[in-house]
Amino acid sequence: MKCFPQLCVLVVTVLPLILSCFSYPALAAKDQCLVLEQNSKSFGRYQILIAPTVVKLINKSKNIIQIARLMDGKVFAFKPDLKLIYEADLNNWKPQLAQRMVFIAGETMEAKSYKFTGIETIAGLRTKRLESTEEKSETTMMLKGTHTEARPSRVGISDKKLWVLDGQSIPKQLENFVAKMYGLPALGLPIRFSAVMENSRKALMCDTLEAKRVPLKSVDFSIPVGYKRVKSDGDLYMDNTGSQLLDFMR
């Protein structure tokens, strides 16, 4: 078999470049952290930092930080100003606040009711749009201060649309962690969630305002030591006098 010197030089020079094109995205994802700036109608402003094996949520409104780690399957939630920390198992973790919010709204948030309806770009991210066919739940309510009989009424929110990140390699457990924090179905990393409230007003209950990547080494995923342990993440939403900070639930 003949070997042409020019061809051999071309192969030796170009082949490494071709291979590097295929390997660079994986290396970039491994060495970088995806940062999302989000706003929630119920939970306030969040910064979410997503790495290959850990995710960190910073609630800027309440100064509460949550970290979920795959390495040991743990969830930590802590409040620096009060020196309080809550620890739970990642697989069994159920955020008290999100569960209470869903209960108040009369929602079941079942994943099976959501259907894929398209692809959209939000904050520069490719997302899948999912829409729910779930109707408002029916309940029997008695009007306060009246002597009328209780009558059936439909409560909850409608026209639910959920946008989740598409085309990114993020561990399912970390996606589910963020979704559960918002009280949303585990269908992917939530980028936006909109719905029509009971007063017929449309609201963005979760929205991504900005997305960027930063060097992974620039993010602090450490857990503080010396904090007082509490039994529930709900305990972190109490001030020094013990009064509730959950003004959005009143």
Image: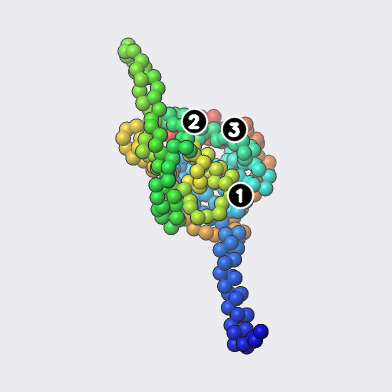
Number of residues whose C-alpha sits closer than 10 Å to that of mark 3, classed few (under 14), some (14–19) or many (20 or more)? some
Front in this rendered view, residue 217 or 203: 203
Q: Quadrant of residue 155?
A: top left
The quadrant of the image that shows the C terminus is top left
Sequence-first tag of 3 and 1: 1
In this rendered view, identify the residue nearer to me: 171 or 208: 171
Disc 2 packing (10 Å; few <14; some 14–19; many ≥20): some
Residue 150 percent across, percent down from the top left: 36, 15
41 horizontally vs 240: left or right: left
How are the residues colored?
Answer: rainbow
Image coords of residue 28 (percent x, y): 57, 63
Residue type pointed to by label 1: Val
Residue 62 visible in rendering: no
Disc 2, SS: helix
Q: CA distance from mark 3 to mark 1?
A: 21 Å
Q: Residue at x 36, y 20 (%)?
A: 152
| Residue pointed to by mark 3 | 232
Determine which residue is flagged by label 2.
100
User: Which residue reaches farthest top?
Assistant: 147
The picture places residue 59, in percent across and down from the top left corner, at 51, 44
- Residue type at mark 3 is Ser
Name the residue nearer the viewer: 86 or 177: 177
Which mark is first along the chain, 3 or 2?
2
Check disc 2 and give the amino acid type.
Answer: Arg
Position of the N terminus by quadrant: bottom right
- Which residue is label 1 attached to? 54
Q: CA distance from mark 2 to mark 1?
A: 26 Å
